[in-house]
Image: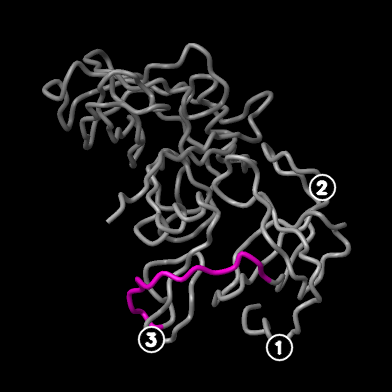
Amino acid sequence: MPEVLKAPLVVEFPFTRSLGPVQSAFLTGLRERVVLGVRTGDGRVLVPPVEYDPVTAEELSDLVEVAPTGTVTTWAWNPAPRRGQPLTTPFAWVLVRLDGADTALLHALDAPGPAAVHTGMPVRIRWAGERTGAITDIACFEPYDGRRAEPTGHTGEFEDPVTGIVAAARLDYTYSPGRAQTAYINALSGRRTVGERCPSCRKVYVPPRGACPTCGVATSEQVEVGPRGTVTTFCIVNIKAKNLDIEVPYVYAHIALDGAGLALHGRIGGIPYDEVRMGLRVEPVWTEGARYPDHYRPTGEPDADYDTYKELL
């Protein structure tokens, strides 16, 4: 059996969100080295604060300052920090109940090793040198055996409050397409399109999935389809995608390759965007060294009759 493909992939984007009054006060407070919680109707102080009581769903707005010292309630050792984590050397993830709070805050604890960490140990906040109004304004927690700090009685009112944040969301992972799609990708490198036929319903899936989603049985019989096909449905793209060197507007379509039991995605080129239509007969256009078609262009054949592709819409 050919080796199954795998490759490292990264999904990354900036996540922008606005802040309500409670979260705004909390993050602005961190910028000013003040930790704020919120008091519930039964007197509990929640840190980090939330806008609604998780038990009663009551709206919360009574801000309360708590101390920058606290107690570890539970922990786990992280021997190999990853990119973007609070510390670059091994550290402990800890839940810390700050003095004056009834709930615990998750953050990093800078400790020389797991033997130096225990539930119930006293800690304090180590503030970041540069603070912008984010959870990272707390650089980490550190062991502390001194006098417990006292809140200053801050009201939660600030000049120039933080009203929004931008968080970089990133996921690093290794993707494997599996046996069936590995065969499909390898065939594309030879400018062939290969699907797999379901032994029960006889539908040919392109790209293949390794199993028929309708019948629930494994597929293994390979079937070469295309290379020509029929546009079943399409859309006109008017917004230019970042890092995609294609001028707008352009057409992205579902294309039912000859012999396939469902349509795949592809860009339509070689024709004005407003002349693309359902039933248009197309063929792939390859560029030198490419592992998949760059786009599909009209073949010049008469349009396909609707009845020949209506089940593939």
SS state under label 3: loop
Q: Main secondary structure of the magenta part?
A: loop
Residue 66 in picture, x, y percent from top left: 41, 29
Residue drawn at x 60%, y 34% as measured from the top left:
166
Mark 1 is surrounded, within 10 Å at the Cα level, by few (under 14), some (14 to 19) or many (20 or more) other residues, namely few
Tag 2 residue: 248
Identified by mark 3, the residue type is: Ser
Is residue 222 rendered magenta in the image?
yes
Residue 275's place in the image compared with 147, above or below, is below
Is residue 299 rendered magenta in the image?
no
Tag 1 residue: 307
Tag 3 residue: 200
SS state under label 1: helix
Identified by mark 1, the residue type is: Asp
Residue 23 in picture, x, y percent from top left: 55, 39
SS state under label 2: loop
Residue drawn at x 28%, y 24% as measured from the top left:
109
> How did the renderer colour the structure?
one colour
Q: Quadrant of residue 210?
A: bottom left
Residue drawn at x 81%, y 54% as measured from the top left:
270
Q: Please tell me which of labels 2 and 3 falls first in the chain.
A: 3
Q: Please tell me which of labels 1 and 3 falls first in the chain.
A: 3
Q: Nearer the viewer, residue 23 or 176?
A: 176
Query: Which residues, given as a range, are shown in magenta?
Result: 215-229
Q: CA distance from mark 2 to mark 1?
A: 32 Å
Mark 3 is surrounded, within 10 Å at the Cα level, by few (under 14), some (14 to 19) or many (20 or more) other residues, namely few
Identified by mark 2, the residue type is: Val
Q: Which mark is residue 198?
A: none
Q: 277 left or right of 6?
A: right
Residue 190's place in the image compared with 125, above or below, is below
